[in-house]
Amino acid sequence: MKLLLAKRTQLVTVILVAACLVFIGALAPDSVVLRRKLMESNNSVVAEALNKAIKEKNFAEIEGKCDVILENMDKVLDFFPPGSLSENSRAKPEIWARWGEFSKHPANVRKAAQELAAAAKAGDEEAVKVRFKALGEACKGCHQSFRAPKPKQGT
């Protein structure tokens, strides 16, 4: 009786582990779609809006867009689960091989966005320009190491 119970327990454990692996695998494509939406669509729009707001000296808009960046950086690591590589993604495998390094980048971007927001709140036009450049460098720091270039048109 104990042997039968032990075998059933093992079987249930194997089934649960397999189900979890299938679930994680099924999530990976959704993660690719979500991160593309977040990183390419949302962040590109925010960057363009920030650039426009800086030219117009619209400090309230700059602060608002920085809030969006902060929210995005709170979510970004969740969109890179193991196994979420895809031909539709520009994410490099180095993300998972160097996860410790990769996972520090959102904090760098957050810090740069917070500093830009503070400069905007103070109405300091020169500091805003400097902090905007620093934000771009924080984004680029991750993209250079962990994002593949865009495919060339027509290939």
Image (tube, rainbow, N blue to C red):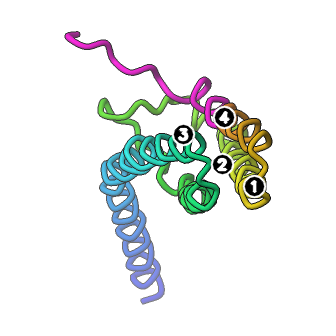
Rendered image: mark on residue 51: 3
Q: Which residues are magenta?
A: 139-155
Q: Earlier in the sequence, mark 1 or mark 4?
A: 4
Q: Secondary structure at mark 1?
A: loop
Rendered image: mark on residue 123: 1
Q: Earlier in the sequence, mark 3 or mark 1?
A: 3
Residue at 60% of width from left, 43% of height from top? 54
Most foreground residue, 87 or 112: 112
Q: Describe residue 91's horizontal placement relative to residue 121 as left or right.
A: left
Identify whether 136 is placed above or below 69: above
Rendered location of residue 48, percent (x, y): 47, 40
Q: Earlier in the sequence, mark 4 or mark 2?
A: 4
Q: Quadrant of the C terminus?
A: top left
In terms of image quadrants, where is residue 120? Answer: bottom right
Q: Describe residue 139's horizontal placement relative to residue 148 as left or right.
A: right
Rendered image: mark on residue 6: none
Residue at 42% of width from left, 64% of height from top? 17
Rendered image: mark on residue 106: 2
CB contact under 8 Å: marks 2 and 1: no
